[in-house]
Amino acid sequence: MIKESLRGKKIAITGSTGFLGTALVELLLREIDDIQLRLLIRPSGKRSASKRLERDILRNDAFDQLREALGEEGFDNLTNKTVKALSADISLNNLGLDDAGLQELSECDIVIHSAAAVSFDEPLDRAAEVNLMGPIRLVETLQSLDVEPHLVMVSTCYVAGNRKGTAHEKPLSQSPFYVPLNWREETEAARRTRSYTEDDSRRSENLEKFRAEAKSELGAPGISLIATKTEQIRERWVKDKMVEAGRERATSLGFPDAYAFTKAMAEQAVQEVRGDIPLSIVRPSIIESSWGEPKSGWIRGFRMAEPIILNFGKGTLREFPGIPEGIIDVIPVDLVASAIVAVAAQEKPSDPFVVQVASGACNPIKIGILADYVHEFFGNFPILDEKNQPITPSKWEFPGRGRVVTQLTRAKRILQVAENGLHKLPIRGNQAMVVADLEEKRNELDKAMEYITLYGKYVECEAIYDVSNLLQLWDSLDNSDRSAFPFDPRIIDWRRYVYDIHLPTVVTQGRVKTTPSSSPPDSRGNRLRKQVLDPSRQLAVFDLENTLIASNVVSSWGYLATKRLSSQDRLKVIIKTVLEAPSMLAMDRRDRTDFLRNFLSEV
């Protein structure tokens, strides 16, 4: 039924460069004959939509199976005949399409909207512009073309918010927990918040604070570098404020974050403005690596669970909010892609048709069981530390969120006090190693706090997502369609999926060390020394009483000043430089520009 229904159809897809979008394109190319795909892709920098189609989608390893089956020439012939990139941007009116692009869109039978700002810490205004206004602009563009294709909108189960009990496959307006919102006012409020925050960041007291922070971090590097660093700090401050604004607004309305909040508003808004455009809504839960296709364990980028799992394996994350008996609702990406295709193949619905693709209602996995699988895996296949020694994973504890946050906050405060004290002293010798060690521990704490802030609410979620419509759709398929488009969550064997499929993928994607290196392991001192002197750092310590200069200046000066000298003459240069250090220090404290001019004049 699915193959026959979609044969010969022209389908437009947004979000095709993303994880789910790539899986969707691969599935349609592999299983549907005589299909036309029009991928709305936003150009990025100097890379056109066509270049992104080639590099970001078709070269992905998701297509390895299809490329191997057809051969390179056959694969190229298929994609050249079937797939076309349309330069588009959902943040622009008419989606930024030119006349030819609009004509292509007007000829499409089905439009699948998968584009989204999927980060859980997205600034409020960006989440609103992409997740809410993006689908609105898509609907308005279709209406301006006077066409009514079947619109399949990808949403999320978490539009149900922080609720308990069953969340049904119904439009949000039919939910007893429905909160009517004026999406236009919410969008304007998000834009105003951005404007207010930008203005606030430019207030004199804030600019002085940013400049002081830049000086504290850089020393006295001159006006230009201080100005650049100050602006970076200001922009980071604005982003953090906008992320917090999104989190606070979402929480006030019962949503875990701005992502779920703006997705919920998008559902309401599209139903309000769609007119006669047929609408289906597909709500996945937490999408993770594939169950079977295009190959078991295929994933694109890190999702929600991967950083948590890896840090558990490394021993840097030992506690996480949640309860062992709670359900973590995870669904493999290939099941979601198959469900979207099955929904798209249905007759155009007269009323919005909602399908949730989730596992918790019919094939749940409990958080405690998942943690046991992860613990067993890293017990058998441990991550190795810098000394090639296996890291023994601890048994994962599940205290309350408040206890975990309190412990992390206290530990961060202690480290911050220690760092502040050390930064007031010249950094040299063993002290540099201590500073690097403190920085390493602080980064670990920052990561742990970030994971709890971003993902804790999803782990603690007590909603059960009804999948009655999904299973009814599954029951309507014949065996051929079930084989080609599997989306029944009951097919998942959780131990096999977690232990044999997903965790090996996580380890590979994370590029963590699980086999000993051939060279002898570094001592802890050498490891920390490398961290301090890592060439990838943008700034390096130059020991003039805790001042800093750009690392490329040091390396360039050292190379040019000594490249033709013998070892004895090099030593003379070093001694001369050391003797001149006091005068250099005085000059550097006045102005880094004068210091550099004098310093480099010796070359």
Image (cartoon, rainbow, N blue to C red):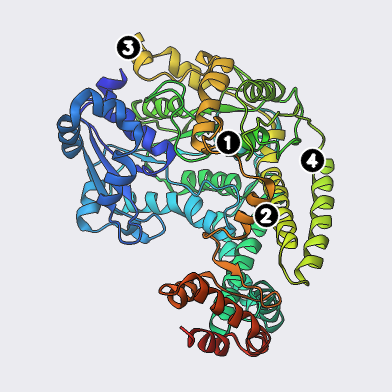
Q: Earlier in the sequence, mark 2 or mark 4?
A: 2
Give amino acid for label 3. Ser
Label 2 to label 1: alpha-carbon separation = 27 Å
**Disc 3 crowd, CA 10 A, few/some/many (<14, 14-19, 20+):** few
Quadrant of res 193: bottom right
Q: How far across and how far down the image is residue 514, in percent?
A: 56, 30
Label 4 to label 1: alpha-carbon separation = 20 Å
Q: Earlier in the sequence, mark 3 or mark 2?
A: 2
Residue 99 relative to residue 480: left or right? left
The residue to which callout 1 is attached is 306
Eyeballing the image, is 178 above or below 389? Answer: below
Q: Earlier in the sequence, mark 4 or mark 3?
A: 4
Label placed on residue 249: 2
Q: Earlier in the sequence, mark 2 or mark 1?
A: 2
Label 3 to label 2: alpha-carbon separation = 47 Å
Q: Nearer the viewer, mark 4 or mark 3?
A: 4
Give amino acid for label 1. Glu
